[in-house]
Image (cartoon, helix red, strand yellow):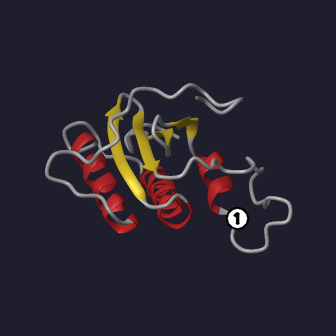
Amino acid sequence: MREEGLAPARSVPVRGTAGTSVTTAAAARAHARAVVDARWNPSTGPAREEDVVDLLLVVSELVANALRHGGGLAGFGMTPVRDGVRLAVRDHSDTVPAEVCGPGSRPAGHRVGGYGWPLVVRLARDIAIEKQNGGGKTISVFMPIRSADRPA
């Protein structure tokens, strides 16, 4: 089942790459950095640092939300593609973010926090929330990564 108004989920593996165990936001960030460094390297051209910072923020927010609000992290996957990376985070909760807020705004009646999801919405592309059979959900996003060699 797909949330109304969001792009359909693409097929993205929701597990760590062989040999990786992503169970924390720090481990997810380290894995994301390793994927970017392997794909955008001296022979292909390094990644633009501001794009990497945006990716690491989105990784942190999605994993932290899964841990804090989603009953724990059930899966993490990241796939490099031509112009960026596809990221998928699975948790154990069927609850989807209540609102998609504009940049810097908070959900009505929300007293604590509330900035993580709007940050994801602002920085990511092709956001999809797919409820899983047997419970839980997967949030998939595309994060653009440009080569540092290309002009802005």
- What kind of residue is marked 1? Gly
Q: Residue furthest bottom?
A: 112
Horizontal and vertical percent for residue 148? Answer: 39, 45
Choose between 25 and 103: the one closer to the eye: 25
Direction from residue 69 to residue 150 in the image, left or right: left
Give the total of numbered labels.
Answer: 1
Q: Residue shown at 64%/55% (left/top)?
A: 117
Q: At x 65% / y 33%, what residue is drawn?
A: 3
Q: Of helix, strand and loop, which one carries label 1?
A: loop
Q: Is residue 23 above or below residue 16?
A: below
The foreground one among 40 and 129 is: 129
Q: Quadrant of the N terminus?
A: top right
Query: Quarter of the image holding residue 13?
Result: top left
- Name the residue furthest front: 134
Residue farthest along the left direction in this orientation: 19
How far across and how far down the image is residue 10, in percent?
A: 45, 26
Look at 36% across and 60% down and name the residue there.
Answer: 29
Q: Nearer the viewer, residue 80 or 40?
A: 80
Quadrant assignment, res 88: top left
Compared across the picture, whether 35 is left or right of 12 comes to left
Please tell me how crowded label 1 is: few (under 14), some (14-19), or many (20+) other residues with Cα within 10 Å: some
Judge from the rendering whether residue 138 lies leftward or rightward of residue 100; answer left or right: left
Q: Which residue is mark 1?
A: 114
Q: Position of residue 18 (x, y in %)?
A: 16, 46
For the point 31% across and 64% down, the residue is: 27
Q: Closest to the observer: 22 or 2?
A: 2
